[in-house]
Image (tube, helix red, strand yellow):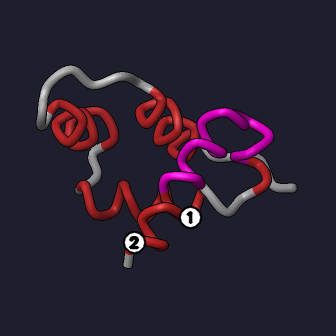
Amino acid sequence: MAALSERELAVLALEARPWRTAGAKERAIREELDLSATRYYQLLNGLLDRQEALAHDPVLINRLRRIRAAKRAER
């Protein structure tokens, strides 16, 4: 297994944080990671399929996988 990069770890850390106001997460994505929201979600979605991410934070990854599966089932 390849190790997660610093950017990938930062994406997971940001995703794990609670957000109180609308737009706060998107603002943090731009300011802290210097990414567009679209690119952030592309990276995050890719991380959900990686065993390294699951090993790093199984609770977060499993929760996000369930959310993704539920959204796919709605389509």
Count residues near mark 2 (Cα–Cα under 10 Å), then give few for <14, some for 14-19, many for 20+. few
Residue 37 appears in which quarter of the rendering? bottom left
How many labels sit on residues? 2
Is disc 1 placed on a helix, strand or loop?
helix
The region drawn magenta spans 53-67
Residue on which the image places disc 1: 46
Is disc 2 placed on a helix, strand or loop?
helix
Residue 22: percent from the left, percent from the top?
A: 12, 34
Main SS class of the magenta portion in the image: helix
Taking the spot 27% from the left edge, 25% from the top edge, the residue there is 19
Taking the spot 21% from the left edge, 35% from the top edge, the residue there is 31
Taking the spot 41% from the left edge, 32% from the top edge, the residue there is 14
> In this orientation, which residue lies closer to the viewer: 50 or 61?
61
Q: Residue furthest right?
A: 1
Q: Is 63 left or right of 57, judged from the image as shown?
A: left
Q: Is 28 left or right of 59, judged from the image as shown?
A: left
Q: Residue furthest bottom?
A: 75
Label 1, label 2: how many angstroms apart (C-alpha)? 20 Å
Please name the amino acid that badge 2 sits on: Glu
Please name the amino acid that badge 1 sits on: Gly
Q: Is 46 left or right of 73, judged from the image as shown?
A: right
> Is 65 part of what is drawn in magenta?
yes
Picture layout, residue 49 above or below residue 17: below
Mark 1 vs mark 2: in front: 2
Residue 74: percent from the left, percent from the top?
A: 39, 71
| Precedes in sequence: disc 1 or disc 2 | 1
Residue on which the image places disc 2: 74
Residue 27 appears in which quarter of the rendering? top left
Q: Residue furthest front?
A: 74
**Rendered-image quadrant of the C terminus:** bottom left
Count residues near mark 1 (Cα–Cα under 10 Å), then give few for <14, some for 14-19, many for 20+. few
